[in-house]
Image (tube, helix red, strand yellow):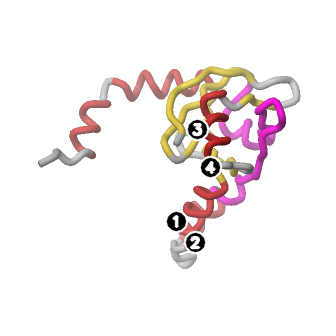
Amino acid sequence: MFYGQFEHTIDKKGRLIVPSKFRESIKEHYVEKFYITTGLDKCLFMFTEEEWSRQESKFKAVPFTKSDGRRFNRMYFAGASDVECDKQGRILIPKYLKDYADIKRDVVIIGVSNRIEIWSKEKWVAYYELSKSSYEEIAEKLVEPEG
């Protein structure tokens, strides 16, 4: 549903414009609300309401008797906030989430199929540089050959 990479800036009021390509998909799928939370690798994860429900079901199944499960669920759900696009296609990112992801002004928004990730530009550039050399090696480990 969400694909591509886009550079944007956060305005003085903390609003971020959702890329127009994503807004087209949002209209097409009748998305009204998103959930944004602390992601992995110091980025933010943003899910449609439908996808958030799927994620929530998975994580609710993690036994709360396991300390790692409790710790992850606390961080993941305590960091969550619901957001809606305004008429100009902007969302307001809460300060605590911007702080978590070290987002000041310049961001990179990437589509990762069922979610949107929001990165500080500096963090994304560093992550991308570190990861691009191992892309093929990772593919060999994760992707099963056809046939």
Q: Is residue 64 above or below residue 38?
A: below
Q: Is residue 88 magenta?
A: yes
Is residue 23 rendered magenta in the image?
no
The amino acid pointed to by label 4 is Phe
Taking the spot 76% from the left edge, 52% from the top edge, the residue there is 82
Q: Mark 1 or mark 3, which is nearer the start of the sequence?
A: 1
Separation of residues labelled 4 and 2 (CA atoms): 17 Å
| Percent coordinates x, y for residue 39 in the rendering | 59, 46
Which residue does the numbered mark 4 point to in the structure image? 47
The answer to which of marks 3 and 2 sits earlier in the sequence is 2
How far is the residue under mark 3 from the one under mark 1?
A: 23 Å
Q: Which mark is residue 117?
A: 3
23 vs 139, left or right, is right
Q: Secondary structure at mark 1?
A: helix
Q: Which residues are magenta?
A: 76-104
Disc 3 to disc 4, C-alpha distance: 9 Å
